[in-house]
């Protein structure tokens, strides 16, 4: 039945308000589309106390983080205010309706009051508060000429200000006074986006150099490194004393004013800003940049000298009947322009097996490095090539030497020295990003520096760590939530985590899960990857231990789930291999076909595990340990 005339009934005002703090908490999630903050935040959630109208705001990468954020907010109220939340009032969005969210509210005795669909008026406090916040955010950004990507900082400032301003609803008392019982301090307030001068620390300045650096906006966002500073040693321009008048007395001193237009470097921001260098060495992106720095000139000269000593090529005039080829090897065809060409490298399982055997037998471990990796081979054809403008140095030249006879090891090192240009690095301590620590009880291998560099890359140095790399009983799908505007950061992080599984078996499964979304990652997937890095932040020194005196018995374990993938219903399988007490090989992967039963999935993983066992047995036999 339909009616031709209908109108919305008026919404009555709430009959009563909370009688004390935290009796009722209002909450809502807003999306700032399509603008993403410089920290890749896209959403924010607010929590408003009904009694004091005090507001808390949290920034989100994905809406699925609302539950974890609410747990943090709940813990804050319990710990800092010794109080409990009685009612949570929100809309009926999926972020509040999940089973785990509702189960948590029931376990804590919190009543969940949800508005009807398409009825934001029933959640009016949170809706009106968000409108007020965004009004202030727009005003701050426009007045200060700060780019919109700093909306997180503007929103934090807006919440800070509104919590300290008298409110007519509270009889002209500020929310902070209502909640804490004392008046707010206004002496520390500064103009958002004003010029500030950061005081340099002792090691950053000299006696006759500037003692501070000029920055804008006020929270100190370094334009050279795109790095936020948490230093409190800064002076806003409004607090500076006038400079002494060094001009003639008739010339009046004029004080500087805020720039009417933002500097050009304010507009530059892209995901490449997060791709920070992992060391203090300048990394050039082209030959021209490299030639501007003496260290790279010296490195190139050393490489050229090594190539000349190895007689890799001879510089001759090109015969008139010969057309020289370029250096675009990507356009060459197999068996047309070249035959087989490859650089064999050791499998990481082989490296771990060697370490396990050497530690078990108490052998010494030495490391050598080839100064020039391009060793000349005997070509069957005469090739003429155009001279390139520069050289690309690729490192695939690390060598590990171990054995029972120290004299034989020394003889081998001498033989390598006389044949190639080698560098003796002494005892094995660092190999392909793996840090090797020698102890009396064995060898411990981890990737501590690699993890710290990864944390710095994402900008999670100041965030808290978590105990698990992945939420329990959560299934991630390919088409969940919105696509990332630029998947570069996601792919870079997952690629780094894949290499980190070399020593971290505990993240092998979760990294496998999110490596499936490399082609079309979503905001939810990026938030989950950041969770993995937060987990690593709490345990950066974990790794593999190879004990001394362990037996060399090969032991294997395997397991599988059944139809665990929510998209394809394929099973996820995994296995690990121990050589004595040392873990040397493991893998987590998705089966290439759907199993009809749990038993079939188990047999499939046993088959792949047996293939690895056969390969390891062959390796051990070649090494003399059948």
Image (cartoon, rainbow, N blue to C red):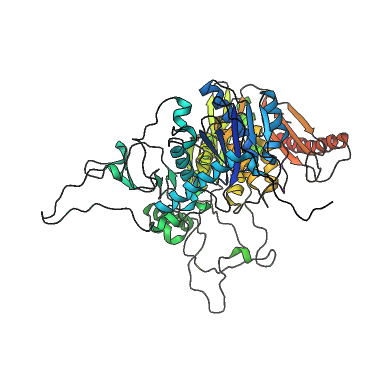
Q: Position of residue 11 (x, y in %)?
A: 65, 42
Quarter assignment of residue 545 = top right
Quarter assignment of residue 562 = top right
Q: Which quadrant would the C terminus be assigned to in this image?
A: top right
Quarter assignment of residue 406 = top right
Residue at (34, 48) in percent of width and height: 195
Q: From what the image shows, is residue 83 above or below residue 623?
A: above
Q: Position of residue 370 (x, y in %)?
A: 51, 46
**For the view shown, which residue lies furthest in the bottom direction?**
320
Count numbered badges in the picture.
Answer: 0
Which is more toward the observer, 298 or 196?
A: 196
Q: Give the magenta range.
A: 463-478
Which is more toward the observer, 277 or 225?
A: 225
Which is more toward the observer, 364 or 311?
A: 364
Left or right relative to 609: residue 356: left
Q: Per the image, is 470 magenta?
A: yes
Q: Can residue 88 be seen in the rendering of this structure?
A: yes
Residue at (48, 52) in percent of width and height: 148
Q: Position of residue 393 (x, y in %)?
A: 50, 53
**For the view shown, which residue lies furthest in the left direction?**
249
Q: Main secondary structure of the magenta part?
A: loop
Residue at (48, 70) in percent of width and height: 316
Q: Can residue 542 be seen in the rendering of this structure?
A: no
Which is more toward the observer, 327 or 527?
A: 527
Q: Position of residue 319 (x, y in %)?
A: 53, 76
């Amino acid at each position: 039945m339909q009616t031709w005339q209908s109108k919305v009934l008026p919404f009555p005002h709430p009959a009563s308000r909370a009688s004390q703090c935290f009796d009722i908490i209002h909450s809502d999630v807003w999306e700032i589309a399509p603008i993403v903050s410089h920290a890749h935040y896209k959403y924010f959630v607010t929590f408003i106390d009904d009694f004091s109208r005090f507001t808390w705001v949290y920034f989100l990468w994905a809406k699925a983080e609302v539950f974890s954020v609410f747990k943090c907010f709940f813990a804050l109220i319990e710990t800092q205010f010794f109080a409990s939340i009685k009612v949570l009032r929100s809309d009926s969005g999926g972020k509040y309706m999940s089973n785990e969210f509702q189960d948590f509210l029931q376990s804590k005795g919190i009543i969940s009051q949800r508005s009807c669909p398409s009825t934001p008026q029933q959640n009016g406090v949170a809706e009106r508060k968000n409108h007020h916040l965004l009004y202030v955010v727009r005003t701050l950004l426009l007045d200060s000429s700060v780019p919109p990507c700093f909306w997180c900082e503007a929103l934090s400032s807006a919440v800070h200000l509104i919590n300290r301003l008298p409110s007519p609803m509270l009889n002209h008392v500020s929310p902070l006074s209502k909640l804490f019982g004392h008046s707010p301090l206004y002496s520390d307030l500064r103009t958002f986006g004003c010029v500030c001068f950061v005081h340099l620390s002792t090691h950053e300045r000299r006696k006759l150099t500037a003692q501070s650096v000029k920055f804008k906006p006020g929270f100190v966002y370094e334009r050279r490194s795109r790095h936020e500073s948490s230093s409190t040693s800064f002076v806003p321009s409004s607090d500076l004393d006038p400079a002494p008048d060094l001009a003639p007395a008739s010339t009046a001193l004029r004080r500087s004013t805020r720039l009417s237009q933002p500097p050009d470097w304010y507009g530059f921001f892209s995901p490449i800003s997060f791709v920070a260098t992992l060391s203090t060495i300048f990394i050039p992106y082209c030959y021209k940049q490299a030639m501007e720095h003496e260290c790279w000139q010296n490195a190139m000269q050393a490489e050229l000298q090594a190539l000349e000593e190895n007689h890799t090529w001879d510089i001759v005039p090109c015969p008139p009947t010969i057309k020289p080829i370029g250096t675009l090897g990507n356009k060459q065809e197999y068996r047309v322009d070249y035959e087989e060409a490859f650089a064999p490298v050791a499998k990481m399982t082989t490296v771990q097996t060697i370490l396990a055997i050497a530690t078990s037998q108490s052998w010494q471990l030495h490391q050598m490095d080839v100064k020039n990796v391009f060793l000349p081979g005997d070509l069957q054809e005469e090739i003429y090539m155009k001279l390139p403008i520069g050289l690309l140095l690729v490192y695939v030249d690390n060598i590990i030497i171990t054995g029972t006879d120290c004299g034989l090891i020394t003889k081998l090192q001498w033989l390598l020295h006389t044949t190639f240009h080698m560098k003796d690095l002494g005892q094995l301590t660092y190999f392909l990003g793996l840090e090797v620590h020698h102890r009396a009880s064995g060898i411990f291998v981890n990737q501590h520096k690699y993890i710290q560099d990864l944390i710095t890359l994402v900008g999670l140095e100041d965030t808290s760590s978590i105990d698990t790399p992945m939420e329990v009983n959560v299934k991630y799908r390919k088409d969940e939530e919105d696509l990332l505007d630029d998947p570069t950061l996601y792919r870079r992080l997952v690629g780094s985590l894949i290499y980190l599984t070399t020593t971290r078996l505990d993240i092998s499964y979760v990294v496998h899960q999110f490596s499936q979304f490399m082609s079309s990652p979503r905001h939810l997937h990026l938030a989950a990857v950041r969770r993995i890095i937060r987990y690593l932040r709490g345990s950066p020194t974990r790794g593999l231990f190879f004990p001394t005196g362990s037996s060399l018995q090969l032991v294997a374990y395997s397991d599988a789930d059944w139809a665990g993938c929510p998209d394809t219903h394929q099973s996820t399988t995994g296995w690990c291999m121990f050589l004595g007490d040392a873990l040397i090989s493991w893998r987590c992967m998705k089966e290439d076909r759907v199993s009809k039963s749990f038993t079939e999935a188990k047999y499939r993983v046993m088959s792949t595990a047996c293939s690895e066992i056969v390969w390891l047995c062959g390796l051990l036999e070649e090494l003399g340990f059948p």
